[in-house]
Image (cartoon, rainbow, N blue to C red):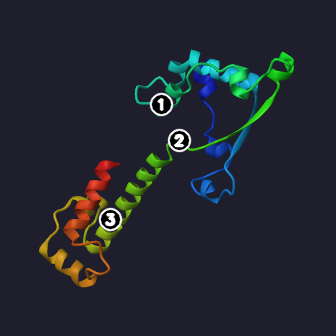
Amino acid sequence: FFQEACDVESPEEHFSVDSYTDAAMLSPPMITLTLQELHDMHQLLLEHRTDVAPEQYDPLHPILDDIGKVPSEEELLGGAIHEIPPRTLANTEICLTLIRRFKEDEDKAQQLYNEAKQAVIELIRGRPTALTIREVIHRQVTNEEEALYSATYPSTTSKGTLVEVQRKALDALDAL
């Protein structure tokens, strides 16, 4: 049941968003839930955490570890709730602002990707005789290629020597 329930289209496809949508938003996204829905979801996540994130290094594990015990309505509302009828209380709506928990990790990964891409582009420019991308990245830099690269791309515009650019590309690709 849970496997089928999790087999859905990606949120990006469903909500028609991409990596630029977040940057273009004027206000952070919000969701509205009733206290009953929040309570039920919290309880279900606690009961089925191994079904939700079965892999040992699943990125959901830190989030599931942080949710703690199911809070009471009083803890959620932060005050006296004794005068409010239970049915009304359960149907009380709250708005939650959604935040990116792993934005820093995503930014680092995106930065590594951009560095790798830039270094590979620089290598392609500096190695016009290479026939494949594998050759561009892995073949040892010759003295002739280094001299041509230095003459074509002076040190003020390039990212270093061709050997240094190759090392940067390999390091960034290994890190990805």
Q: CA distance from mark 3 to mark 2?
A: 29 Å
Residue that mark 3 sits on? 119
Is label 3 in contact with label 2 (beta carbons under 8 Å)? no
Which numbered marker is on residue 145?
none
Query: Residue lying farthest front?
Result: 80
Which numbered marker is on residue 62?
1
> Badge 2, how many Cα within 10 Å: few under 14, some, many 20+?
few
Is label 2 in contact with label 1 (beta carbons under 8 Å)? yes
Seen from the viewer's position, the closer of residues 21 and 28 is 28
Q: Which numbered disc, 3 or 2, marks the residue that appears first in the sequence?
A: 2
The residue at 81%/17% (across/down) is 82
100 up-or-down from 129: above or below: above
58 up-or-down from 70: above or below: below
The residue at 49%/25% (across/down) is 65
Tell me the mark number nearer the camera, choosing from 3 and 1.
1
Q: What's under tag 1, amino acid-wise?
A: Pro
Residue that mark 2 sits on? 101
Circle 2 sits in a helix, a strand or a loop, which is it? loop
Q: Which numbered disc, 3 or 1, marks the residue that appears first in the sequence?
A: 1
Q: Which numbered disc, 2 or 1, marks the residue that appears first in the sequence?
A: 1
Q: CA distance from mark 2 to mark 1?
A: 10 Å
Q: Splitting the image into 4 quarters, where does residue 123 fall?
A: bottom left
| Left or right relative to 143: residue 87 | right
The quadrant in which the N terminus is found is top right
Estimate the x, y position of residue 126 in percent, counting from the top left: 27, 74
